[in-house]
Structures are given as C-alpha cells and as structure tokens.
Image: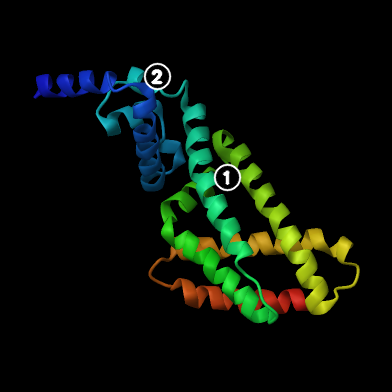
Amino acid sequence: MADAVRSERERAAHLGPERRRPQVLDAALALAVHSGVGAVTIGAVADNLGVTRPVVYACFRDRAALIEALVEREGERLLANALAALHSARGDDPEAVFVRGYRAFLDVVADCPDAWRLLFSTAPDPAGADKFREARLVMADNATRWLRPALTAWWDVAELDRKLPALVELFMSSCEAAARSLVDHPDGWRTQELGELYGRMMCRAFSAA
C-alpha cells in the first residue's frame, strides 16, 4: 500500500505545475465549500490530491497565493455571467425588467453554487478580500450604468446623482441577499420564483426613490 501511494505521488510530481494547477484549485474549492475557507491549507490540499506539499508549492508559493488564484478564477467566471444577466434585462415595463433580471442572475447562481459559497466565505478572508472587492466594484459600475437611464426613463427620479450611489448599493446588496437565499436554502426556492419575489420588491423600492 505504501509503495502504491509513493508511486502515485512520484507521478504527480512529474505532471508539472501548469497541468497540476487547475487540479490544485479544484481541490481547494472542494475544501472551502465543505469545511470553510479556513480549512484550505497547502497541507490539506496536498492530502486531498494525494501528493506531497512540494507539488502544491510548485504551483502556488503559499496559502494566500492559492486562495487569491482560486477566488480570481471563480470570480472572473461568475462576474462575466452576472454581467451578462444584468445586461439581458431590457424592456419598457419596469417590473417585468426587474423580474427578468433577477431571474437571469439567480440562474447564474444556481449553475455554480459552490463558487458563490466560496466568494461569500472568502469576502472577509485577507487572502480573498481584495479580489472580492474588485469584482464587486466592477459589478457596481455596470449596475450604475444600467440603472441611471432606467430610473430616468421610468420614474424621472429627482436628484438622481445624489441618490444613485445609495440605490446602487441597495441593488448590489439585494443581489447578494438573493444569492445567499438560493445557495443557503437550495430546497426552499426555485430561481424563477425567487427572482420574481426580488424583482417585484426591488421594482417597488426603486420606484419610491
């Protein structure tokens, strides 16, 4: 048995960092989702893969670099899909547009629940916090450019420039809350149902601005 483990680890060492790196990230994601981001260490990832620590260190210099790369990989994919969902919401009926947008966004969440759990769990972690903030800023900037003309066209919101930062933060927070509701209670909601709930609520909130 020991000879078999040793043989597997020797083969792993020869796989090379470039080919090994995605496997290391996949193992780190599984650990983070199952046991929390605090459980993601070089040793834990090595054990998960059945390799030695030097194999993992050849891919990432330390734990911080590993988590940063993991958050960046998952965050870039989720951000691209979330932006596509945001920009898909178009039309003349405000409530229908809001419902369509939240449904599209929650479909993105449902497609990659583990990645969203990772982002939520690493938001306060020093190794992932910067990447989380960067992704949130990009999303907020796009939300601003989407909301400004919509609020003007639908409700002619007074003092829009002053109110817009608060409205964007409300929008961002509502998206995060909807995503958490879906990933934390997967058996409690269907994306279409939860999207309609949030779409209607947020449409009314924005119309009151």
Residue that numbered label 1 is attached to? 123
- Of residues 15 and 168, the one nearer the viewer is 15
Q: Position of residue 187 (x, y in %)?
A: 38, 70
Q: Is residue 54 above or below residue 50?
A: above
Q: Which mark is residue 85?
A: none
Q: Position of residue 85 (x, y in %)?
A: 57, 63
Is residue 209 in view?
Answer: no
Mark 2 surroundings within 10 Å by alpha-carbon count, few (fewer than 14), some (14 through 19), many (20 or more):
some
Q: Residue furthest left?
A: 1
- Of residues 38 and 171, the one nearer the viewer is 171
| Label 1 or label 2, whichever comes before in sequence order | 2
Quarter-of-image position of residue 17: top left
Mark 1 surroundings within 10 Å by alpha-carbon count, few (fewer than 14), some (14 through 19), many (20 or more):
some
Quarter-of-image position of residue 48: top left
Q: Is residue 207 left or right of residue 74?
A: right
Q: Position of residue 120 (x, y in %)?
A: 53, 50
Please state which of the two labelled residues, at mark 1 or mark 2, is closer to the viewer. Answer: 2
Name the residue rendered at 58%, 34% in the picture.
Answer: 126
- Between the residue at mark 1 and the residue at mark 2, the CA separation in whole angstroms equals 26 Å
Judged from the image, the secondary structure of the residue bearing numbered disc 2 is loop
Q: Position of residue 36 (x, y in %)?
A: 43, 44
Q: Amino acid at mark 1?
A: Ala
Quadrant of image for the N terminus: top left
Judged from the image, the secondary structure of the residue bearing numbered disc 1 is loop
Residue that numbered label 2 is attached to? 58
Name the residue rendered at 51%, 74% in the picture.
Answer: 194
Name the residue rendered at 56%, 38% in the picture.
Answer: 128
Q: Is residue 47 left or right of residue 204?
A: left
- Of residues 25 and 126, the one nearer the viewer is 25
